[in-house]
Amino acid sequence: MGTDRLVRFYCVVTSLALIAFVFPTPVSASKPTIRLTNGEFAPLMSARVKHGGLVSHIVTEALANSGYEVEYGFFPWKRAFVMAKNGRWDGSVAWGYTAERANDFAYSDPIYPERIYLYYRQHFVFDWQDDTDLQGVKLGVNRGYLDEYMLQQMQKRGLDINYQTTTTELQNFRALLGGRVDVVISNGLVAERLLKEHLTPQEQDKILQHPRPFRVTPLHVLISKNIDHTDEYTSAINRGLQMLHNSGRYDELIADFNSGAYD
């Protein structure tokens, strides 16, 4: 190679190196992240189970369909609600509808139907057909749950409703066994898991589930109205959830859950 050609060659190489330095090859940007509070409600939601529980997994996949990632923060439920309400987190998974909550949050489309039952001690005479059957009964309920709100509404209608609140379902069932309450209000799936994991077979036999649900309520993702992207995030969840249904993936997740994949 001649001298002139060699000089021109090094000039070209040097120029390309400078271009590469000044204008580096672009890398793909990470997906935007939505930050949602969560809590312990195994097997539907929990930091200790696969995919964060069924409901968490549904929300994660729905948002992935819309091009978003999810960051979950697991907290006590009351704290989870307040942190989402004031906009420190973008929203919270997953809650039933009340008009009061709607003042501070936008609701996603329904994610999963929650089935709540009444549990009572063996030999305790109890039947559940309507709200009046709860009068004079000592009830145990989790603080801040929709069930507490419903009991408060019964009180406002003049019914004699007596209840005490705790922070965990297990505390409620301990109170039931100890005779401190007569009836516990709990999610059927959550109760089934708790009783098997924490109570002896003899203790389990002492607790009966009334066959008639106390309520069946769709759960939603709440997106705070105190953030800048309330409508955007709510729409993203709804679009992605519809894609899950249309593709059949939603039914696959439910089938996996029923077969024990989240245990």
Image (tube, rainbow, N blue to C red):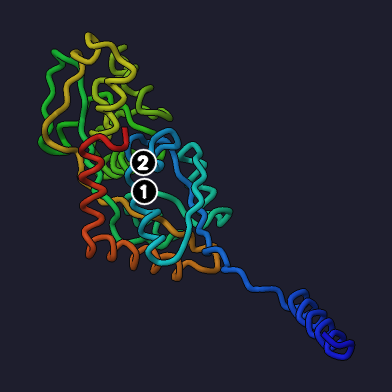
Q: Quadrant of residue 247?
A: bottom left
Give the percent coordinates (x, y) of residue 48: 43, 33
The amino acid at mark 2 is Gly
Q: Is residue 92 above or below residue 43?
A: below
Q: Nearer the viewer, residue 222 or 8?
A: 8
Residue projecting furthest to the bottom = 4
Residue drawn at x 52%, y 59% as measured from the top left: 33
Left or right of residue 21: residue 231: left
Left or right of residue 216: residue 220: right
Left or right of residue 107: residue 83: right
Q: Is residue 24 above or below residue 176?
A: below
**Crowd rating for badge 1 (residues with CA inside 10 Å; few <14, some 14–19, many 20+):** some
Give the percent coordinates (x, y) of residue 83: 54, 49
Residue projecting furthest to the right = 3
Residue drawn at x 21%, y 52% as measured from the top left: 251
Left or right of residue 251: residue 47: right
Q: Which numbered dot is residue 57?
A: 1
Q: Does the CB distance between marks 2 and 1 fall below 8 Å?
A: yes
Q: Tell me how many marks there are.
A: 2
Residue projecting furthest to the front = 1
**Alpha carbon of mark 2 to alpha carbon of mark 1: how far?**
6 Å
Instruction: Give the residue at mark 2.
Output: 53
